[in-house]
Image: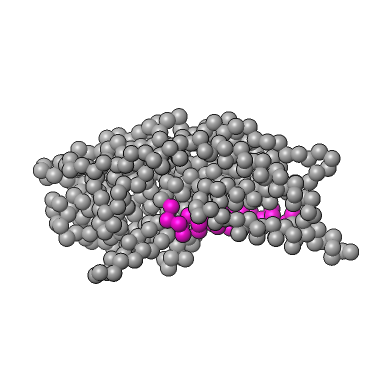
Amino acid sequence: MISCKQQSHDYKKVFSDPILYCKTVKKLNDVVLENNFPPMIGSRNYAYANIAAYECMVAGDNNFISLAGQVGHLPAMPKPDTSNGKEIDFHLASLFAFTKVGNAVTFPEGSMMGYYDELKRMADSTGMPSTVLENTITFSDSIVAVVMRWSKKDNYAQTRSAEKYTVTDEEGRWVPTPPMYAQAIEPHWREIRCLVMDTCSQFMPVRPPKFDVKNKNSDYWKALTEVMTVGDSLTVEQKTIADFWDDNPFKLNVSGHVMFGTKKFSPGGHWMNIVGIAAQKAKADFSTTVAAYTETSIALFDAFISCWDEKFRSNEIRPETAINKYINEEWHPYIQTPPFPAYTSGHATISAAAAEVMTSWFGDNLNYTDTSSLEFGLPSRTLGSFRQAAKEAALSRLYGGIHYRHDNEEGSRCGKLLGEFIVQKLKLKKSS
């Protein structure tokens, strides 16, 4: 009798464990990685899945506030039916919602449903009554339905058939880079509905230095030659930083006539991992963990829109292209140049935005060890704060030879402003 009674309460402990939520986010991160999602599309997956989970969590924790009416025209959420003593496990509802929305906004279809079934088996094996499981699924599905209808109005589908980027031979303008020579990725991402920003250009950067390779005293020439000089004299530590923050979803490796691809998570996926590491280090409870993931994913989502708005406004040439054309045709950056314009740095922008949100949740002095890249054979790094991590991520792009310093510095400045704006505008937790 005691054994049965103990078992009947196991499920509450299992599903309220914040580490399980972290593992659930990692499941989606793995799907994004395996299917080569570009970083901005990955940010969309993380945001909608986390928002659905958050809305389920809010229904069971009155210390937190719904995002309905706060982000991107999100409508009011269905209320849970707890009449006649109906029990709902809101923690499991959050996990179900994250998994179903994550599954719906990714491909191939059904990629997350194996894990969904695993959660149901876990509920059964830990003693959750079938009626509680049914109530939980019904409530979770009601949230999922609203979030999915809302997500489909963000203009994503329309941009799938939008006009492709036109490459021109105008001096100083971006062109495809080796070894893939891929077309520009997501030139219409600025048209995606923002979640918190008023418009995609709300945090528009200052103009980059004017392209000028004739005047050796021009700001542009100085920025260009700095990339080459730094790249030609990298220290071991600088290479380590460039590799650690590379986060290239798909790198094409070329060795003679042999070509093969290697995968890593995207910059956004890296920051999702950092949220999980930080939440565990801070010993955050389930609700706080979900909230931190959600607000950080919102920051990543809007930061990519903001940055892509600028990238396809300025269409800045990549350092590799300019160095090869005007200085040394044999020069190569330390890491692979991604297929879109340089200004501003996406990694700098999204990292600074994420760091501000995470600082608001966990403080500015949470020393943590980032183990994210161990699965790719790279060593861990210990950082003193999220802002330090963001600065290092930005600087890594100069070390990698794929960005000018002004790309990184202006991206960081605008990303920080965006992050601060999100922290000020969104109200996730009630005042104590």
What residue lies at 42% left-to-right and 56% top-to-bottom? 36
Residue sticking out furthest to the left: 214
What residue lies at 45% left-to-right and 29% top-to-bottom? 198
Q: What's the magenta region?
A: 12-37
Q: Nearer the viewer, residue 322 or 250?
A: 250
What residue lies at 29% left-to-right and 63% top-to-bottom? 235
Whether 97 is drawn above or below 191: the answer is: below
Q: Position of residue 153 (x, y in %)?
A: 51, 35
Q: Nearer the viewer, residue 66 or 39?
A: 39
- The question of residue 18 being in magenta is answered with yes
> Which quarter of the picture shows residue 324?
bottom left
Q: Nearer the viewer, residue 112 or 16?
A: 112
What residue lies at 47% left-to-right and 66% top-to-bottom? 375
Quick check: 403 left or right of 428?
Answer: left
- The question of residue 229 being in magenta is answered with no
Quick one: quadrant of the N terminus? bottom right
Quick check: 295 left or right of 216?
Answer: right
Quick check: 340 left or right of 383?
Answer: left
**Secondary structure predominantly adopted by residues drawn in magenta:** helix
> Which quarter of the picture shows residue 334?
bottom left
> Which quarter of the picture shows residue 118?
bottom right
